[in-house]
Amino acid sequence: MLFALFFGAGNLIYPPFLGMESGTTFWLAIMGFVLTGVGLPILAIAAIALVKGGAEGLASRVHPLFSFVFITVVYLAIGPFFAIPRGATVAYEIGFRPFVQGGTFESIALFLFTLIFFALVYVVCLNPTKIVDRVGQWLTPALLLAIVSLAVASFFKLDGPAQEVSEKYSTAPFFTGFLEGYLTMDTIGSLAFGIIVINALKERGIHDQGELMKHSVRIGIIAGLGLAFVYIAIGLLGVKMASYGSFEMEVPFLQVVQNFCLDQVEKFCLEL
């Protein structure tokens, strides 16, 4: 469950770009990326398990006012301001927009897609007690299967060499990757996900603080290993894709369907 919660839009966007831009310095860059994109979220999960009161209790050690402001900013960032809109728009841009761009339907496609997207999210979240089973047993295997299939296919189909390092990664690739890892937003997201993990463990009969801490760290490590594998796999995909350039559908799928229907109507009218 935790792997699927962590793996959002940012996790899919940044590693391939890192691979394309870092070129021959990919391994140094991805090491820095994994350190912040995986290591810090695991530490945050452990910290939430260590203190009572979750993220609020953790932040209140600085000052109650700081806790209020900090938690408000965190939840707005991983909620309506950044993460939630990014989740829908990235899914639309990658999975749906190529089929409708340039057609008359594009102007309302994003709106309809967003309604359906968040309706499905709402259904999944209606029963919080089942989120572990729904997300962990169904979404995580589907995600991993899709990513592994993509990585295996790229291994056999793509043989482009690593390109020259871009200016962005030319001087300090490790530390540039280190900063890029923050953009996944998993570190601040884990402050909310940690509560979900703790509640899930308590529902399974684990209430001792030491046991909660131990199990939370184990869960974080397992999810972190999965994330590290995914980051490296799709990062290498970006390295191989750099020499091929970018691709665009010349004729969107819906435009093809529209043209086909018009042709059939025209033929039918001619026959009449």
Image: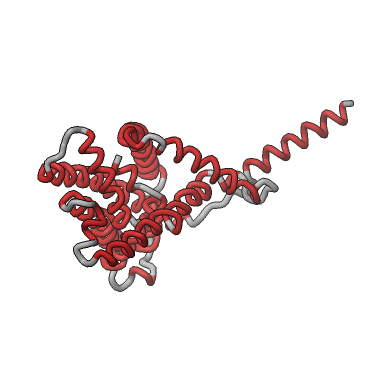
Q: Position of residue 25 (x, y in %)?
A: 30, 63
Q: Position of residue 150 (x, y in %)?
A: 39, 42
Q: Quadrant of the N terminus?
A: top left
- Residue at 36 percent across and 62 percent down: it is 73
Left of 258 or right of it: where is 158? left
Against 201, residue 195 (above or below) is: below
Residue ranking furthest to the front: 64
Instruction: Report the front residue among 40 and 102.
Output: 40
Q: Number of numbered discs present?
A: 0
Q: Examine the rendering and report whether any part of residue 156 can be seen.
A: no
Against 203, residue 244 (above or below) is: below
Q: Examine the rendering and report whether any part of residue 165 can be seen.
A: yes
- Residue at 67 percent across and 40 percent down: it is 256
Instruction: Report the front residue among 200 and 120.
Output: 200
- Residue at 35 percent across and 47 percent down: it is 7
- Residue at 39 percent across and 68 percent down: it is 166
Q: Position of residue 160 (x, y in %)?
A: 40, 53
How are the colours assigned in the image?
A: secondary structure
Instruction: Report the front residue among 88 and 121.
Output: 121
Q: Position of residue 53 (x, y in %)?
A: 22, 52
Residue ranking furthest to the left: 210
Left of 96 or right of it: where is 147? left
Q: Quadrant of the C terminus?
A: top right
Instruction: Report the front residue among 159 and 154.
Output: 154
Residue ranking furthest to the right: 272
